[in-house]
Image (cartoon, rainbow, N blue to C red):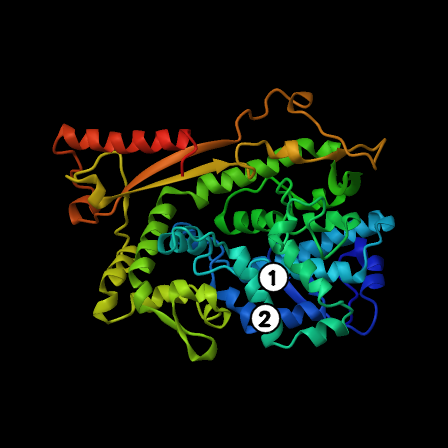
Amino acid sequence: MTCSFLFSPHTEIERRIFQGKDYCKVFNDPIHGHIEMHPLLVRIIDTPQFQRLRHIKQLGGTYFVFPGASHNRFEHSIGVGHLAGRLTLELNERQPELLITRRDILCVQIAGLCHDLGHGPFSHLFDGMFIPKIFPRLQWRHEKASLDMFDYLVHVNNLEPVMKKHGLVLPDDLVFIKEQIYGPLDNDAQNQEWPYMGRPKEMSFLYEIVSNKRNGIDVDKWDYFARDSYHLGIQNNFDYHRSLKFTRVCELVKFLICVHISEFTNLYDMFQTRNCLHRRAYKHPVTMAIELMITDAFVKADNYIHFEGSGGRTFKMSETIEDMEAYTKLTDHVFEQILHSTTDDLKDAREILQNITNRRLYKLLEKTKAKSISEVCVSVKFKMDWGMNDDNPIDHVRFYSKQNPDHAIQIQQHEVSGLLPVLFSEQWIRVYCKKTDAEIVDGGDCSLPSKVTVQMLEKVLKSRAKKLMLGGR
């Protein structure tokens, strides 16, 4: 099958860009329909490092609460690669003066495809909860592992000749791909006027497609809003198809991706969708209880679960982030490895996971029977926001009008409606009881034995709330 592409609005432009004897592969996706992938993208997908994403849940512990949330990072990554190509093609068709090349489009698609290669077991649980417990001072996130895994994927599968065959220029395009995933690779260059090396300042808009550091509007979110809502059974009020049609590039110091002025309220719907997903699913009280339990089990098992890496060395679960050969073997399967283990070393970790499977979960407290809060309670602090911390993300968006499509403007809230939100973040604290005694699990009496315990709990909450108000972490 040749690269004729199925999206009729783009047929001619896609033929023009992907002309030649390249053969595409069709993926049938429940969110985007039939997706055609360029053969270079297929070569990347058909590697063990990418196939690993089949075994990492997109929503971590949320699957234990929402039965439909069984989708994985694999299909999400394919969706982001697809949408990255769609948006780039739309911009190229709408504004041929941007001089977007075939190389640019492939690089943006590869970045979308590979942006989540570095996720560990249960996705954000691994880099947001487990690793900080093991290495409290380590500033590590999955995007860093995505760069390491991408380098490893290219090297071990000998993909550089394939990339050159399809028109990429190395190492420049490899740098460009990694910058889209992570941001500037040189820390010293971040304060410079233009910190990127992969593409010149005139192509700055390309860095806002996969991971938009300026306002958070990118194809990564477009895919997971649609995909997560679909699998969670939650209504998604944001339609990315419309945004694709009302996006163009304007020059304002840099060349920025801008949105038509009529899309102002639609973008509020987009960020409200994000807030809704966090509130109703990602930060669901039971989801957080289960993820706390999985984290505790992983911490207890860390010294006893090992993976073979490069040079025959073995690495603990937490140490695999140092070696991509070992990290390739680390997926959600470690849950079953611990759950079905028989060694005494893993007894404590195994019991925690058995409690999950038997639904003996940490309990969200308003009252506790414990005599010592520090022994049986764990507190979780987190922020609910619209994606830009305390800021209104729309303040970071630039718009254009039909009368002046090449001029970027900013719109204030009061110019649109007085009914829009005023605050865009809030702090939360939840306290969970780790005890799973039968009387608690079965709904027995959880009344407090004394006023002292109530005072202890209130003291913990007030202390943590004060720290949060002061900006403490």
Q: Name the residue tied to disc 1.
A: 114
Asked if residue 219 can be seen in this view, the reply is no
Q: Quadrant of the N terminus?
A: bottom right
Horizontal side of 251 relative to 153 (left or right) equals right
Asked if residue 82 can be seen in this view, the reply is yes
Horizontal side of 393 relative to 102 (left or right) equals left
Disc 1 to disc 2: CB gap under 8 Å: yes
Of marks 1 and 2, which one's residue comes earlier in the chain?
1
Question: Depth check: 47 or 181 in front?
Answer: 181
The residue sitting at 43% across, 61% down in the picture is: 121
The residue positioned farthest toward the left in the image shown: 449
Question: Depth check: 138 or 461 in front?
Answer: 138
Question: Depth check: 464 or 384 in front?
Answer: 464
Question: Picture coordinates of residue 337 (x, y %)?
Answer: 34, 69
- Distance, label 1 to label 2, CA atoms, is 10 Å
Horizontal side of 217 relative to 67 (left or right) equals right
The residue positioned farthest toward the right in the image shown: 97
Judging from the image, what secondary structure is the residue with disc 1 in? Answer: helix
Question: Depth check: 310 or 188 in front?
Answer: 188
Q: Is residue 148 above or below residue 250?
A: below
Asked which quadrant contains residue 339, the reply is: bottom left
Amino acid type indicated by mark 2? Leu
The residue positioned farthest toward the bottom in the image shown: 312
Q: Is residue 231 above or below residue 45?
A: above
The tag on residue 338 is none
Q: Name the residue tied to disc 2.
A: 153
Badge 2 density bin: few <14, some 14–19, many ≥20, Cα 10 Å: many
Badge 1 density bin: few <14, some 14–19, many ≥20, Cα 10 Å: many
Asked which quadrant contains residue 364, the reply is: top left
